């Protein structure tokens, strides 16, 4: 049994990235373990987790399990968890109660707890003591080992807690069962070395490590062959891509090479303002299939708070970068993340956040109340700001964010724009998709447009979406 350790994670080495190509093996004993049986998976959190779930699904299907819509009927239940804020944590713990009941009525079901929460020391201790009925607890670095844990489980029927703390390697050749036939997530790197003081990710996802360019390009080439229209290159901090590889190859080089595969649309998340180079801006501008959309978290409008967050930039530097991107890339849209209520954030600090939003007028912003995470430096700061004040600040900020989201969308009224139609919309008779600039559009059309990039005329504007009709016909 391996337990994680946050202290050790902080002192991890920054050595060269190790790439493993042959570590995904299904032991003979479990090759058919899922025959006639089913699995259900609950996924919380970011795209990285969503993509990990796509790997877990494929691994389970390699052992012959089939997907089951209803959690109540499944023979294997996977809880892929998120640790970023307390509310994500609470939702997971609530669901654990529900799964406990299922396990009581059907003791032979197999329960798996994985994702970022599994990397937290306090959680694994709790699972060991209070949730002994959870069969497999697996961290974020060792998903490919799942078949082995099944094998051990059938041998001894004892709880497995397999979480690596300091490890951070790259594993190639893990299968994937993609949720969409048209757009795909592609990991380009794992982990994060930025250590923003509020954030649990550098501990739960390990050190920053990049995949080799040729492995990424090959994956995208296969997606092109399979008629995929869009890839999103995934990493906690994609601009730092390649820095750990010693091959003198940057995110800008990668974007260029992915562009040359001919895939119709390329997106990438998340960018940290620290590593965003001029070469990257030039590359995005140069290639039509690199989408003019950038998610650039600012987190706060106050230099004082940014310093305490260890964000490594000032508002002046962020603004310079923002303006440079806006100037260079026509029609670009920029979204951001903002945290309110960081420990001891003053009214003046918060006002500076409102000021920068008024100045930069983001297309979209994901806003959060600061949530202390055990083990992070910020969680040790004594905070004098009460929750009521934080909630008021969030509401005020959201009002402003919504105003600019709507105003930015207004520019699209009666215009023709390209949308990749990806699924049926919740609205009857409509299909949904995104513009190149990542605006959600509900399009009045038929099924035949699914998976196609079509010209759409926008005829109604809302804060979070727009409506449109096909302009090609
Ligand atoms: N509390 C609130 N928000 C957080 N984020 C990360 N950690 C925390 C935390 N402890 C936000 C940041 C980040 C986004 C993914 O989640 O804004 O960019
Ligand atoms: Fe967390 Fe900062 Fe790394 Fe983003 S860059 S994952 S906020 S530590």
Image: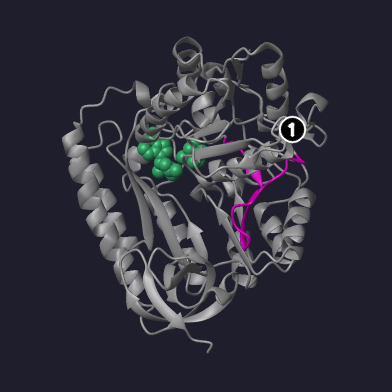
**Residue 141 quadrant:** top right
Which residue is label 1 attached to?
16
Q: Give the side of residue 23 with respect to residue 158, left or right.
A: right
Figure colour scheme: one colour
Q: Give the side of residue 174 with respect to residue 49, left or right.
A: right
Q: Is residue 233 magenta?
A: no
- Density class for disc 1 (Cα within 10 Å; few <14, some 14-19, many ≥20) is few
Image position of 377 with respect to 466: above or below: above
- Residue 156 position, x and y percent, is 68, 11
**Residue 23 quadrant:** top right
- Residue 243 position, x and y percent, is 68, 42
Q: Which residues are magenta?
A: 172-192
Q: Give the side of residue 82 with respect to residue 304, left or right.
A: right
- Residue 449 position, x and y percent, is 56, 75
- Predominant SS of the magenta segment: loop
- Residue 79 position, x and y percent, is 51, 32
Residue shown at the point (43%, 26%) measured from the top left: 96
- In this view of the protein, can residue 297 be seen by the observer? yes
Helix, strand or loop at disc 1? loop
Residue shown at the point (48%, 16%) measured from the top left: 127
Q: Is mark 1 within 8 Å of ligand 2?
A: no
């Amino acid at each position: 049994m391996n337990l994680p350790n946050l202290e050790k994670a902080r002192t991890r080495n920054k050595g060269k990235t190790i790439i493993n190509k042959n570590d995904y093996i299904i032991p003979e004993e479990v090759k058919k373990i899922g025959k006639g049986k089913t699995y259900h998976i609950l996924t919380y959190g970011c795209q990285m987790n969503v993509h990990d779930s796509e790997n877990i699904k494929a691994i389970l299907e390699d052992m012959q399990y089939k997907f089951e819509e209803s959690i109540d009927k499944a023979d294997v239940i996977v809880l892929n968890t998120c640790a970023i804020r307390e509310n994500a944590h609470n939702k997971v713990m609530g669901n654990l109660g529900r799964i406990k009941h299922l396990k009581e009525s059907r003791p032979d079901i197999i329960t798996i707890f994985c994702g970022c929460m599994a990397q937290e020391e306090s959680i694994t201790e709790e699972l060991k003591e209070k949730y002994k009925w959870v069969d497999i607890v697996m961290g974020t670095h060792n998903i490919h080992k799942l078949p082995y844990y099944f094998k051990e489980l059938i041998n001894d029927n004892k709880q497995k807690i397999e979480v690596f703390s300091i490890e951070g390697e790259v594993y190639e050749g893990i299968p994937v069962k993609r949720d969409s036939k048209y757009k795909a997530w592609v990991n380009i790197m794992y982990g994060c070395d930025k250590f923003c003081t509020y954030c649990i990710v550098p501990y739960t996802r390990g050190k920053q490590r990049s995949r080799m360019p040729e492995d990424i390009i090959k994956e995208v080439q296969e997606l092109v062959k399979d008629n995929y229209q869009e890839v999103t290159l995934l990493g906690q901090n994609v601009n730092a891509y390649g820095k750990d590889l010693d091959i003198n190859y940057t995110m800008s080089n990668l974007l260029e090479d992915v562009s040359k595969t001919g895939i119709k649309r390329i997106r990438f998340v998340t960018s940290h303002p620290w590593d965003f180079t001029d070469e990257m801006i030039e590359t995005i501008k140069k290639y039509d299939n690199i989408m003019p959309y950038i998610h650039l978290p600012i987190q706060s409008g106050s230099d004082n708070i940014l310093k305490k967050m260890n964000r490594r930039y000032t508002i002046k530097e962020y603004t310079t970068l923002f303006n440079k991107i806006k100037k260079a890339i026509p029609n670009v849209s920029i979204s951001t993340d903002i945290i309110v209520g960081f420990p001891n954030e003053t009214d003046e600090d918060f006002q500076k956040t409102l000021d920068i939003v008024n100045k930069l007028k983001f297309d979209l912003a994901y806003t959060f109340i600061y949530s202390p995470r055990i083990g992070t430096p910020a969680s040790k700061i004594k905070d004098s700001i009460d929750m009521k004040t934080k909630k008021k600040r969030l509401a005020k900020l959201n009002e402003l964010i919504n105003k600019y989201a709507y105003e930015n969308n207004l520019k699209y009224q009666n215009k023709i724009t390209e949308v990749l139609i990806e699924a049926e919309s919740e609205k009857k008779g409509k299909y949904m998709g995104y513009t190149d600039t990542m605006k959600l559009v509900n399009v009045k059309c038929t099924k035949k447009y699914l998976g196609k990039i079509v010209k759409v005329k926008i005829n109604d504007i809302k804060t979070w979406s727009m409506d449109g009709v096909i302009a090609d016909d």
